[in-house]
Amino acid sequence: VQAGKRDFQKSIANYQKTITTQEELRILDPANVMPIRSIAITQQDLADVYEKLQQNAQALEYHQKSVEMFNLLEQKNAL
C-alpha cells in the first residue's frame, strides 16, 4: 500500500507540474486553446487520482476546475 501511495503522490506532483506549465503557455499565447484543453484533461486526471486516494474534497475541486476549463473552451468554440 505504501508503494502505491508513493506512486499516487508522484502522479499528483507530475499533474500539478503539467498544469503549471500549461498555465504559463496559456499566458504566453492567449489565442491558443491547446493549453486550456491540456489543463482541463489534466485536472480530470488529477481528480481521478484524488478519488482513488479517497480524498473527495480535492477530487471535487479538480473536477470543478476541469468543468470550468471545458466551459472556457466551449465559449471559445473550441470543443
Image (cartoon, rainbow, N blue to C red):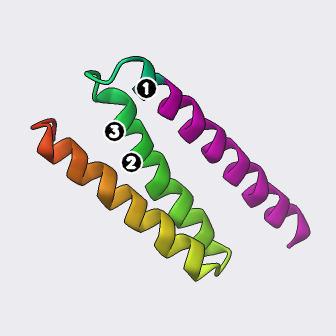
Give the residue at x 49% y 31%.
Answer: 22
Give neighbour class at mark 2: few <14, some 14-19, many 20+ (Cα, 10 Å). many
Q: Which residue is mark 3?
A: 37
Q: Which residue is mark 2?
A: 40
The dominant secondary structure in magenta is helix
Name the residue furthest top. 28
Relative to 32, does residue 79 appear above or below in the rendering?
below
Looking at the figure, which quarter contains the C terminus? top left
Which amino acid lies under the numbered mark 2 shown in the image of this protein?
Ala
**Could you tell me if the residues under marks 1 and 3 are in contact, i.e. CB atoms within 8 Å?**
no
Give me the C-alpha separation between circle 1 and circle 3. Answer: 14 Å
Give the residue at x 84% y 59%.
Answer: 6
Give the residue at x 44% y 57%.
Answer: 44
Foreground residue among 73 and 41: 73
Mark closest to the chain's N terminus, 1 or 2: 1
Task: Measuring from the top left, give residue 36's x and y in whole percent.
Answer: 35, 37
Mark 3 lies on a secondary structure that is helix
Give me the C-alpha separation between circle 2 and circle 3. Answer: 5 Å
Which amino acid lies under the numbered mark 3 shown in the image of this protein?
Arg
Relative to 44, does residue 35 appear above or below in the rendering?
above
> Residue 57 vs residue 44: left or right?
right
Mark 1 lies on a secondary structure that is helix
Range of magenta residues: 1-24
**Could you tell me if the residues under marks 1 and 2 are in contact, i.e. CB atoms within 8 Å?**
no
**Could you tell me if the residues under marks 2 and 3 are in contact, i.e. CB atoms within 8 Å?**
yes
Nearest to viewer (mark 1 / mark 2):
1
Relative to 63, does residue 39 appear above or below in the rendering?
above
- The total of numbered circles placed on residues is 3
Task: Measuring from the top left, give residue 17's x and y in whole percent.
Answer: 65, 38
Task: Measuring from the top left, give residue 63's x and y in whole percent.
Answer: 42, 66
Residue 27 tag number: 1
Which amino acid lies under the numbered mark 1 shown in the image of this protein?
Ile
